[in-house]
Every structure is written in C-alpha cells, then in structure tokens.
Image (cartoon, rainbow, N blue to C red):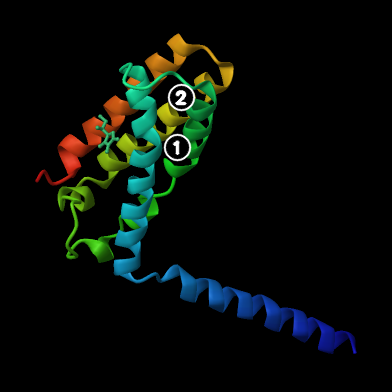
Amino acid sequence: MKKKMVMAALALVLGAGASFQASAQVKPEVLVKQRQAAMTLQGKYFGPIGAMMQGKMPYDAAVVARNSAFLEELAKMPWDGFQASTADLKSDAKPEIYKEMDKFKSNWEKFEVNASKLAAAAKSGDQNAVKAAFGEVGKSCKGCHDDYKVKH
Ligand code: ASC
C-alpha cells in the first residue's frame, strides 16, 4: 500500500517535470510575439505619462500611478523572449543582441530598476520625483533602442 502511494507520487512528480520541459520549448515565433506584445504595452502605458510630463495632457496622479505600476511589471516581460532560436526571424531586434547578451542584459536590468523607481515615485505622489524618474526610464528605452533596435 505504502509502496503504491510512493509510486503514484513519483509518477506525479515525473509527469509534472515532463510537461514543464515541453512548455519550456516555446516556438521562436511565439517568443517574438511575446517580446513585441510586452514592448507595445510598455509604449501604451509610458506614452500618456510622457504627454503629461511635456504638458500636453493635464497631470493625473492616478493614471501616472496605475501606468507606472503596469510598467514596472511589463519591464520584466520581454527578455526571456530574446533567445538564439529567434535570431533568424524577422523583427526589429538586431542580431548584435545575441552576440552581446551580457551588455544587452545589463541594459534591460537598468531599465527594470528605472521602471521600479518610477513606480515608487508615482506612489509617493511627488511630481518632481516622477519627472526625474520618468527621464531615466526614457533614457534606458532610448539607449537600448539605439544599439539594438532596427530603425525604419
Ligand atoms: C516610447 C516608445 C519608445 C520610448 C522612447 C523613450 O513610448 O515607443 O521607444 O518611449 O521613445 O525615449
């Protein structure tokens, strides 16, 4: 009886392992879509804050706080989609990414830190802090795009 239960538990663990492995092998096309979707949403939530910073829209602290909180999470999402398996697919990602993964990674880590700082500033309600943090996020977007995104 005891042995049967152990075997059943073992089968469960092994089964879970197998399905995890299968899901880890995501199709390269899906990885590209994942990246693009995350980046699109980043732009969607970054844009209005930018418009407020430039005085093109009235400052709305609730929208800034919500968008910044979304951005903090979105900032983490594209990066595991940049796998070598995607290097030959058509996208705006330059091939240098896969040759300079350490540098690319340090860029995205800076971006994540800056996005977190923006979310913290937005929560504090200090508009000057939001402005400064927003500028740093924008710089990390642009810095990485300059090096690693194809220009059209
Ligand atoms: C955006 C967007 C970018 C960045 C960049 C910031 O909304 O689409 O690429 O902000 O312009 O400098």
Task: State if disc 1 and disc 2 touch (CB < 8 Å).
Answer: yes
Give percent across and percent down for residue 20: 54, 71
- Kind of residue indicated by mark 2: Leu
- Kind of residue indicated by mark 1: Leu
Which one is earlier in the sequence, the residue at label 2 or at label 1? Answer: 1
According to the image, label 2 marks what residue? 118
- Which quadrant of the rendered structure holds the N terminus? bottom right
Residue at screen point 44% across, 17% down: 130
Left or right, 114 with respect to 123, comes to left
Number of residue marks: 2
Give above or below for 19 relative to 86. below
* Label 1 element class: helix
The mark found on residue 71 in the picture is 1
Residue at screen point 57% across, 22% down: 123
**Image-quadrant location for residue 53:** top left
Camera-side residue: 146 or 68?
68
Give above or below for 14 relative to 82. below
Classed neighbour count for the residue bearing mark 2: other residues with Cα under 10 Å, few (<14), some (14–19), many (≥20): many
Give above or below for 148 relative to 6. above
Camera-side residue: 91 or 58?
58
Left or right, 110 with respect to 2, comes to left
Q: Looking at mark 2, is its residue's CB closer than 8 Å to ligand 1?
A: no
Q: Quadrant of ligand 1?
A: top left
* Label 2 element class: helix
